Amino acid sequence: MSENEKEVDRNEAVKNLEELGLSSYEAKTFIALNRLGRGTAREIYRVSDVPRSQIYGAAEELEKKGLIEIQRSKPMKFRPVELEEAEKKLTQDFKSKKENALNYIKNVKSDLLDTSEEKEDVWTIHGYETVSRRIRDIIREAEDYVILSISESHLFSREILDEIKNRSDENVEIHVLSDQNEVTEELKAISNVRVVKPPESLKRKDVGGRVVVADGNATLLSVLSENKEIQHPEYESAIWSHKTGFSKVLVQLIESWLEEMINS
C-alpha cells in the first residue's frame, strides 16, 4: 500500500472514530498510540499531526473514555487498551448516546403540535422504495380491509406480498386488482384475498402506478414517470393521506372506481 493510500485510509479512520464520539485530536492520538503500542507525547507528535500541546488533553479524555492507560511518570507515557476492549467501549458509548437522543426525541415529539384543529395533511413522496414502504405501512396498519391496484408486476414486491399474507392471517380482507399474471398467481392460494382482473374499459391507460385504500381513512395514489429507471428517485411519485377529511373524500372516489372494477 502506498503512502498516499495509507493517508486516505487514516483520514477515513479518523472520520469514523469522530462519528463514534471522539474529537479529531482524540482520534488521531488513539490511532498513533495503536501504531506505536505505547509512547510519550513527543513520540505521538512525531507520528501524527496533533499539536504537542493538545496531546495531553486528548490523552486525558481518552483515558476517561477507557480507551488508553496513562503512566504518570516523567515523561508521561501512554498506551492503548486491548483493541477488543476499545471496540466494546466505543460500541457501548455510541449505543448509549443513540438511545439518549432517541429517548429525548420521543419525549418532545409533537409537544408543540397544535391540536386545536384537524390537520388536513396530504403528503407527497418520491421513489419506488419510499412508495413501497408507505404501502407496506398502510397494509400493516389496516384492521378491516385493504384494496390494492397494481399496474405492473415489478411494482408488486416480496415485502408487500408478505404484508398481505400477515394481514390476511389476521382476518383483514384484501382485494387486489391486477391483470399481471405474476401478481395473481402469487395471491391465489392466500385466504381472505380476492384477486380481480380489471376490465379493459376501466384500466388506467394514461400512466402506470399503484393505488391503495384501507379502512375508509387511508389512501395512496402513485404514478410512474416515463423514461426513468426504477432506481431513479423520481421513477415513482405518490400522494398519500391518513385519517383526514381529504383522505376520506379521496377514499370514497377511489373506492367507487375500484368497486366498479370488482363488480364488473
Image (tube, rainbow, N blue to C red):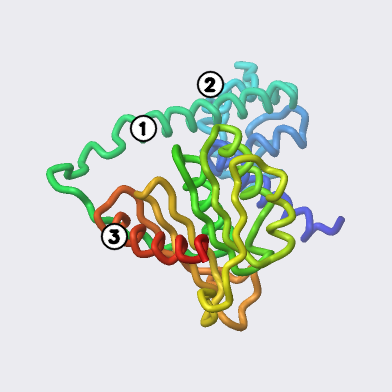
Q: Amino acid at mark 1?
A: Lys
Q: Residues within 10 Å of mark 1 (few under 14, many from 20)?
A: few
**Residue 186's disc number:** none
**Residue 64's disc number:** 2
Total numbered labels: 3
Q: Is residue 108 above or below residue 131?
A: above
**Residue 106's disc number:** 1
Tell me: 246 left or right of 85: left
Q: Earlier in the sequence, mark 1 or mark 3?
A: 1
Q: At which x and y percent is residue 196?
A: 60, 59
Residue reaching furthest to the front: 264
Q: Amino acid at mark 2?
A: Lys
Determine the secondary structure under disc 2: helix
**Quadrant of residue 116 in the image?**
top left
Tell me: 42 left or right of 176: right
**How far apart in space, not on screen, are marks 2 and 1 (Cα)?**
29 Å
Q: At which x and y percent is residue 64?
A: 53, 21
Considering depth in this image, is 33 or 46 the residue closer to the camera? 33
